[in-house]
């Protein structure tokens, strides 16, 4: 790590990493349901350090490497398989922030972190969600998302995009399954 101004940048990158993780519904559901055991909250905080450390050791990460790393952390620490399509999105956010960091662009890092925080739990501003909706709805994704939540909250899906959790799984999960953006499916490994 270079000294001086880059220390501030490093702190900004760390803050951005945490913002992205805090706004990631899959991780939040895992924490809220204690999938990581009694220390789920501490694990979530440690996850931020682990991710930041991972980037610091690997200058040129491919997106799939970031995805594998994050997916593995979720599996190992939270016994959770993320299948809602959010993994590439979060990985992409982290990678973009790291590029800003490498370029020394503190303003872009700040901007991105506050953008993520303001749109908390909306890790879906990509083609992934909009492809399932019609193009006209793209700009209006927020209200679209809101309706999706209401429409699918009781554990019943309106359009079959989200597979049901096995009933033997956590009972509380039916509610948790479709939190925030309408697409989050988090299930415990058998």
Image (spheres, rainbow, N blue to C red):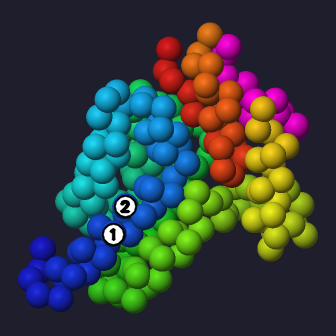
Q: Give how far across and how far down residue 31 sits, in percent.
A: 43, 39
Magenta-drawn stretch, dominant element (helix, strand or loop):
loop
Numbered tag placed on residue 34 in the rendering: none
Mark 2 and mark 1: span between their CA atoms? 5 Å
Residue plotted at (37% across, 31% down) = 36
* Depicted 187 relative to depicted 4: above or below: above
Asked which secondary structure carries label 1, the reply is helix
* Depicted 71 relative to depicted 154: above or below: below
Verify CB contact (< 8 Å) between mark 2 and mark 1: yes
The foreground one among 34 and 163 is: 34
Q: Quadrant of residue 143?
A: bottom right
Q: Give how far across and how far down residue 1 sits, in percent.
A: 12, 74
Q: Which residue is mark 1?
A: 15
Residue plotted at (42% across, 64% down) = 19
Residues shaded magenta? 155-167
Asked which secondary structure carries label 2, the reply is helix
Q: Give how far across and how far down residue 4 sits, in percent.
A: 11, 87
Is residue 26 left or right of 71 when viewed as pictured?
Answer: right
Residue 161 shown in magenta: yes
Residue plotted at (73% across, 25% down) = 164
Work out which residue is located at the far top of the displayed protein and give it. 168
Classed neighbour count for the residue bearing mark 2: other residues with Cα under 10 Å, few (<14), some (14–19), many (≥20): many
* Depicted 151 relative to depicted 92: above or below: above
The foreground one among 57 and 84 is: 84
Is residue 91 left or right of 135 when viewed as pictured?
Answer: left
Q: Give how far across and how far down residue 110 sits, in percent.
A: 41, 82
Numbered tag placed on residue 18 in the rendering: 2
- Circle count: 2
């Amino acid at each position: 790590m270079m000294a001086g101004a880059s220390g501030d940048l490093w702190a900004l990158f760390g803050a951005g990493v945490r913002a992205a993780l805090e706004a990631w519904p899959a991780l939040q559901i895992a924490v809220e349901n204690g999938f990581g055991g009694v220390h789920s909250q501490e694990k979530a905080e440690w996850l931020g350090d682990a991710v930041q450390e991972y980037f610091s050791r690997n200058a040129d990460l491919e997106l799939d490497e970031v995805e594998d790393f994050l997916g593995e952390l979720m599996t190992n620490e939270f016994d959770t398989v993320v299948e809602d399509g959010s993994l590439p999105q979060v990985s992409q956010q982290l990678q973009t922030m790291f590029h800003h960091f490498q370029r020394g662009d503190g303003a872009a890092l700040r901007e991105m972190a506050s953008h993520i925080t303001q749109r908390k739990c909306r890790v879906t501003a990509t083609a992934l969600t909009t492809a399932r909706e019609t193009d006209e709805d793209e700009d209006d994704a927020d209200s679209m998302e809101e309706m999706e939540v209401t429409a699918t909250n009781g554990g019943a899906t309106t359009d079959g995009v989200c597979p049901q959790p096995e009933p033997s799984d956590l009972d509380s999960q039916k509610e948790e399954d479709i939190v925030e953006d309408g697409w989050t499916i988090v299930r415990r490994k058998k």
